[in-house]
């Protein structure tokens, strides 16, 4: 998994996101979310002050803008935080998730206004739905009669043309640490709404205890809707829903992501599709690139970041392929290939700008001027991504970064585990970032079936002494069920069954049966496999998706098989893309033993869906028929997914003819965000001012 030694071929990964079936237009989800917010605000007549839960600012920024809110009566916005609230409007609208801490603050502010004799009309909009607990708390605080309680049903938000998210950053912690399964019900509601738009899922396949709970909730909901309910017609757009809960593959998020977007999330941080960048990178420049100057992004030859860029004021920037022409080409590349791609784009732009000197007629000048806007847009995009690469490269050259990669690689290969544990202890003594050390320890525990009891206790003691005893709850959470990511070996005799099951995670057998690890000497295969996203490691979660939707891709790459026959001759395929015909969805068939070895329930439900005038029909029969148009397979990650998993699924989609993938998730995560969420140290971008803005 040497980041500098391996890159994926431009032909395979530099293409834009695979062509999504135009009949499955997910932009309607954004319009539904926007309309729901406008309707909720319009239910309060007149000017109003909006008091906003800071965790909702990012999601709302993806569906609306401040100007639209002001157009619908919002006079000012404030963050929902303890302390007095000063409002110049009669109407005050609170918009928050139904958490006890927020409701207590709302109650305190209302009581303060009552004591001061201030007369306001209060509306509480809960996201995504109301809760009896909220009513009880407001009643106990004596302010229930002062508040009108309603809901804003915010569900899936499109992040890209093939990614939708609930944007719940703490979903993993809520389920596996707090034991709060509310997010599972909210996920069911979102998927049910999705079905009403696009038709029911003919087949639901899943893996994991909580994935099974979600699947059962969804099927019961579908059965309760009755045959006459909207959308209860066999879908021509969807062929299946694959649900994976995060605990089925805890290894993948613990690793350092090596795609461009993944590494940016690891080292700079992406929140709600926004990244904070130096202001200079966002300033438009119309000057043509006189000389290609994109940095080399190899760790050994990376450029240094200008000191002015490090100290410069930063601004949030929305990473979207809609307005950024280069992002689609760069986002899923292994980072070691980004520098080469940037140089290629810089050379091409340079040549395009030179064409203006060759324009001699009015018609030729007119043609160049027509292209100028696109060239300037690409030039600005090139400046932005060159600058972002310059921010990333020095961090990939540090001893800490490369030592962490080396330990990860050795643990994945089960090479000299004791020495890897010693290396992790060395990182603690060197003051390495806490989340890096925790991720490596959890990786060692999961891949090796636990860490020797005495060794683990010594490491925990060192961790607390080095980073502070405030991290004791984090260590307790990691060592307890249902999370069970940091366990001793052997387990105590009185350990609960959940811990015993977690300790038996079949890592070694999965590594072989799912072809998870590809060695450096198999570089040609690596360049044509999903494992490029980790420079040699294939995410278990995506291999499981392949077990359902691209069975041949688990044991070997089908596109490579089709590319050349036994005698080296070309075989039947589309010459330009190497895409092969997708096979019907038949559940876990062929991988039953592998899937059953992974802890957690296995799901395979074929839904009988009422047809048209001909009566009922089994969904599986429609899947086996030849289809004239492509269908979409929805992959839902319960507990969050990483940018690398999205990149790997896009890669699979490019190899298939007749099947598209839509990634749905509770949120975008990384190992860093997971650890910080569990520890309660996750950062917020709400800013220091009480007045809010999206």
Image: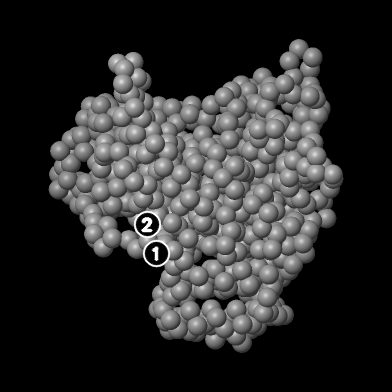
The residue sitting at 67% across, 19% down in the picture is: 228
Q: Nearer the viewer, residue 391 or 634?
A: 391
Query: Which quadrant of the rendered structure holds the N terminus?
Result: bottom right
Q: Which mark is residue 390?
A: 2
Q: Nearer the viewer, residue 665 or 101?
A: 665
Is 443 in front, or is 497? Answer: 443
Marks 1 and 2, how far apart in space?
A: 7 Å
Q: What number is the disc on residue 394?
A: 1
- Give the SS element for disc 2: helix
Question: Could you tell me residue 144's position as x and y percent?
Answer: 34, 43
**Which quadrant of the view contains residue 409?**
bottom right
Tag 1 and tag 2, C-beta contact below 8 Å? yes
Q: Which label belongs to residue 95?
A: none
Give coordinates of residue 478: x percent, y percent. 56, 69
In the image, residue 481 above or below residue 390: below
Answer left or right for 106 relative to 245: left
- Element at label 1: helix
Residue 326: horizontal and vertical position, in percent?
A: 44, 40
With 62 as the anchor, is 107 left or right in this view?
A: left
Q: Which residue is depicted at the point 36% across and 30% down? A: 355
Structural crowding at the residue carrying mark 2, measured as other residues with C-alpha within 10 Å and reported as few (<14), some (14–19) or many (≥20)? many
The reply, left or right, for residue 226 in relation to residue 644 is right
């Amino acid at each position: 998994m040497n980041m500098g030694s391996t890159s994926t071929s431009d032909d395979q990964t530099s293409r834009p996101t695979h062509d999504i079936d135009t009949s499955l237009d997910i932009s309607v989800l954004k319009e539904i979310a926007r309309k729901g917010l406008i309707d909720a605000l319009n239910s309060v007549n007149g000017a109003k002050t909006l008091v906003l839960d800071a965790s909702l600012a990012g999601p709302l920024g993806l569906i609306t803008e401040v100007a639209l809110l002001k157009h619908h009566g919002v006079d000012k916005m404030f963050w929902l935080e303890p302390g007095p609230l000063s409002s110049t409007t009669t109407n005050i609208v609170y918009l928050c998730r139904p958490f006890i801490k927020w409701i207590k603050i709302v109650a305190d502010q209302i009581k303060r206004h009552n004591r001061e004799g201030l007369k306001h009309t209060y509306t509480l909009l809960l996201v995504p739905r109301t809760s009896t607990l909220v009513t009880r708390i407001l009643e106990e605080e004596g302010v229930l009669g002062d508040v009108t309680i309603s809901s804003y049903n915010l569900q899936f938000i499109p992040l890209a043309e093939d990614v939708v998210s609930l944007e719940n950053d703490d979903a993993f912690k809520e389920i596996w640490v707090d034991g709060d399964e509310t997010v599972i019900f909210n996920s069911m509601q979102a998927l049910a709404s999705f079905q009403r738009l696009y038709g029911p899922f003919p087949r639901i396949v899943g893996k994991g205890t909580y994935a099974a709970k979600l699947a059962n909730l969804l099927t019961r909901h579908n059965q309760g809707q009755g045959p006459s309910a909207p959308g209860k017609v066999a879908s021509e757009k969807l062929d299946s829903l694959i649900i994976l809960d995060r605990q089925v593959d805890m290894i993948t998020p613990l690793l350092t992501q090596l795609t461009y977007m993944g590494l940016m999330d690891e080292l700079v941080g992406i929140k709600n599709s926004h990244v904070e960048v130096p202001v200079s990178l966002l300033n438009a420049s119309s000057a043509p690139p006189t000389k290609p100057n994109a940095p080399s992004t190899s760790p050994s030859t990376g450029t240094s970041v200008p000191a002015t860029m490090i100290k410069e004021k930063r601004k949030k920037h929305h990473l979207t392929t809609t307005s950024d022409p280069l992002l689609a080409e760069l986002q899923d590349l292994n980072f070691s290939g980004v520098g080469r791609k940037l140089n290629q784009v810089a050379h091409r732009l340079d040549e395009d700008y030179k064409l203006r000197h060759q324009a001699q007629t009015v018609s030729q000048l007119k043609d160049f001027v027509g292209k100028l806007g696109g060239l300037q847009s690409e030039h600005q995009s090139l400046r932005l991504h060159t600058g972002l690469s310059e921010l990333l490269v020095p961090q990939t050259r540090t001893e800490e970064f490369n030592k962490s990669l080396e330990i990860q690689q050795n643990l994945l290969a089960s090479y000299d585990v004791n020495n890897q544990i010693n290396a992790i202890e060395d990182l603690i003594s060197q003051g390495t970032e806490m989340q890096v050390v925790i991720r490596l320890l959890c990786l060692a525990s999961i891949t090796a079936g636990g860490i020797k009891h005495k060794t683990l206790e010594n490491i925990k003691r060192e961790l607390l002494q080095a980073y502070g005893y405030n991290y004791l709850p984090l260590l307790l959470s990691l060592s307890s069920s249902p999370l069970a990511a940091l366990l001793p070996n052997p387990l105590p005799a009185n350990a609960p069954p959940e811990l015993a099951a977690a300790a038996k995670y079949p890592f070694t057998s999965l590594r072989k049966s799912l072809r998870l690890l590809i060695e450096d000497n198999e570089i040609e295969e690596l360049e044509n496999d999903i494992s490029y996203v980790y420079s040699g490691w294939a995410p278990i979660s995506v291999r499981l998706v392949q077990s359902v939707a691209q069975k041949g891709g688990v044991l070997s790459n089908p596109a490579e098989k089709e590319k050349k026959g036994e005698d080296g001759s070309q075989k039947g395929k589309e010459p330009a893309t190497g895409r092969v015909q997708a096979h019907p969805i038949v559940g876990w068939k062929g991988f039953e033993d592998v899937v059953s070895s992974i802890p957690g329930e296995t799901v395979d439900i074929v839904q009988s869906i009422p047809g048209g005038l001909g009566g009922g029909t089994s969904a599986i029969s429609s899947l086996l028929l030849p289809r004239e148009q492509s269908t979409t397979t929805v992959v839902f990650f319960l507990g969050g997914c990483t940018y690398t998993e999205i990149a790997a699924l896009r890669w699979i989609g490019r190899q298939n003819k007749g099947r598209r993938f839509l990634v749905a998730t509770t949120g975008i995560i990384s190992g860093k965000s997971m650890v910080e969420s569990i520890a309660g140290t996750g950062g917020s971008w709400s800013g220091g001012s009480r007045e809010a803005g999206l």
